[in-house]
Amino acid sequence: MSDQPIQLPNPPAGEQLPITLNIQFTKDLSFEVPGAPGIYATLREQPRVDLALDVQARPLQEGENVYEIALIIRADAKTSDGTQCFIAELTYCGIFTLNVPEEHVEPVLLVECPRLLFPFARNILADVTSGGGFPPVMLNPIDFVQLWQNRRGQTAGNA
């Protein structure tokens, strides 16, 4: 291995990157174990975890190209007899600056931005569930293109 630092490409002078992640943060995190401590003594099987995921985007200031993107994830775990094991809810956000043509804003906001945030949200959910005494919830990769297309199809169907 070389001991030379790796040089990352900078945009040419006067040009901006198409997507800039200004900051990312946990906006809301909740973990509940309604049946604690008894659930730990009676749990004999891997709980079934139902997952729900949503992506929301909103401009921070009207007329600006800065947006808040929120990945909202809910994990609801139950035993086969329906006993609640845990409920985990996470809202993980990023503030993005976009420099893309207007026709590309929606797919960038709802596909590319969440794709950048997802690995961090995935790790937080795995850490909080294992820290709560359960096997870590490891989210499978999400096809944000399909999620966006489904949302567009629902919107077109409602119109």
Image (cartoon, rainbow, N blue to C red):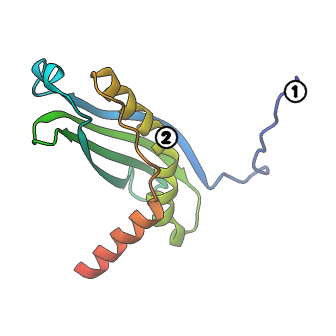
Left or right: 98 as drawn, with respect to 132: right
Q: Secondary structure at mark 1?
A: loop
Disc nearer the start of the sequence (2/1): 1
Quarter of the image where the N terminus is located: top right
> What residue is at 83 percent from the left and 28 percent from the top?
5
Mark linked to residue 57: none
Q: CA distance from mark 2 to mark 1?
A: 28 Å
Quarter of the image where the C terminus is located: bottom left
Left or right: 120 as drawn, with respect to 54: right
The residue that label 2 is drawn on is 119
Left or right: 95 as drawn, with respect to 136: right
Name which residue type carries label 1: Met
> What residue is at 51 percent from the left and 60 percent from the top?
108
Q: Is residue 108 above or below residue 6?
A: below
Mark linked to residue 1: 1
Outermost residue toward the front?
44
